[in-house]
Image: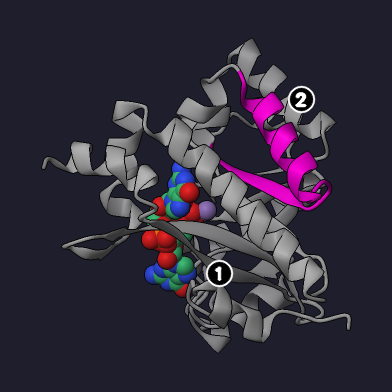
């Protein structure tokens, strides 16, 4: 079977699953959100990471049904956690360009929110190249999502080509600093240390956006980001993406 054929069957055969990576508030230390990340439990090749199949899913259009499955499953998991007494937290889900261009997106997302009761707690991660595609239908899809209470964030920020005047017009809520800029923080205290991470934090705050650092791996990076008033962090320093049963152990509880 070709990779494409097996990916086509992955959905029917229930071979996809989600891992969740927590996002931690740098001020309070609380887990404020989790990002859902898809994995493929291949019958013979074992667990395959998205780097190995998302591009193929995008080329073939399979990303549309896969993306819908991811969204539905992530929201259903969020709902189960709430029902089990965990504090409601934001569920963040990655969106592909193909999904954004696909006409029925807002309607589909709205249906999922209604079915799972996750309204007000869904965030969708877009990339710079997706939102900088200056097309009226993109803006109207983003406005539509905002209209149904979905938060939007720009993933891998700083690696693409953002037009700042365009960014200002977009109905987005947060920027996620790409991990490469976080890796540059060496905590030497030198004038250039973490220069681009700091620039993105201040740009984001000027635009009244929340700023989330990705790929945080060390205590020095955490402290630096905290000192420069970055809002949240995500990365191996706190936790890797984990299966839901494991993620539950660190989720805040109300009851
Ligand atoms: O899970 P991992 O950390 O290996 O993710 C690798 C890449 O795959 C990331 O860029 C992430 O945004 C992307 N990715 C993970 N899950 C999804 C998904 O459900 N949909 C889309 N479009 N991309 C995803
Ligand atoms: O592109 P996106 O940000 O959606 O994908 C997140 C990717 O980054 C996933 O592949 C995830 O496993 C990975 N990741 C998450 N935290 C860390 C980290 O601290 N270090 C590194 N190197 N990768 C990370
Ligand atoms: Mn992401
Ligand atoms: Na990223």
User: What range of the chain is rendered magenta?
Assistant: 104-127
Question: What colouring does the structure picture have?
Answer: one colour
| Magenta-colored stretch includes residue 116 | yes
Label for residue 21?
A: 1
* Circle nearer the N terminus (2, 1): 1
Say if disc 1 is inside 8 Å of ligand 2: yes
Residue 110 lies, in percent from the top left, at 74, 33
Image point (39%, 53%), residue name:
14
Question: SS at mark 1?
Answer: strand
Confirm whether residue 14 shows in the render.
yes
The mark tally for this picture is: 2
The span from disc 2 to disc 1 (Cα, nearest Å) is 27 Å
Coordinates of residue 23 in the picture (x, y in percent): 65, 69
Q: Is residue 221 above or below residue 201?
A: below
For mark 2, what is the residue? 143
Q: Position of residue 107 (x, y in %)?
A: 70, 25
Q: Classify the position of the N terminus by image quarter.
A: top left
Residue plotted at (73% across, 69% down)? 81
Measured from the top left, where is residue 56 in percent x and y? 27, 37
Q: Residue furthest left?
A: 1
Pick the quarter of the image with the C terminus: bottom right
Observer-nearest of 211 and 39? 39
Say whether residue 95 is magenta.
no
- Residue depicted at x 68% and y 35%: 109
């Amino acid at each position: 079977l070709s990779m494409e054929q097996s990916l086509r069957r992955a959905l029917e055969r229930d071979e996809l699953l989600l891992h969740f990576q927590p996002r931690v508030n740098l001020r309070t230390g609380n887990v404020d959100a989790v990002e859902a990340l898809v994995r493929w439990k291949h019958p013979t090749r074992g667990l395959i990471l998205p780097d190995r199949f998302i591009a193929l899913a995008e080329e073939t259009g399979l990303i549309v049904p896969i993306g819908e499955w991811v969204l539905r499953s992530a929201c259903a998991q969020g709902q189960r956690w709430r029902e089990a007494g965990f504090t409601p937290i934001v569920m963040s889900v990655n969106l592909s360009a193909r999904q954004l261009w696909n006409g029925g997106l807002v309607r589909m997302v709205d249906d999922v929110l209604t079915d799972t009761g996750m309204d007000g707690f869904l965030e969708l991660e877009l990339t710079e190249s997706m939102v900088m595609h200056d097309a009226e239908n993109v803006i109207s899809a983003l406005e539509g999502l905002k209209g149904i209470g979905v938060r939007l964030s720009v993933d891998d920020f700083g690696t693409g080509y953002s037009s700042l005047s365009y960014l200002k017009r977009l109905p987005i809520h947060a920027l996620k600093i790409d991990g490469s800029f976080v890796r540059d923080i060496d905590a030497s205290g030198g004038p250039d240390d973490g220069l681009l991470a700091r620039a993105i934090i201040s740009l984001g705050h000027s635009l009244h956006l929340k700023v989330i650092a990705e790929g945080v791996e060390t205590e020095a990076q955490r402290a630096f980001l905290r000192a420069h008033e970055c809002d949240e962090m995500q990365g191996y320093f706190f936790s890797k993406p984990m299966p839901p049963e494991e993620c539950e152990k660190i989720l805040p509880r109300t009851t």
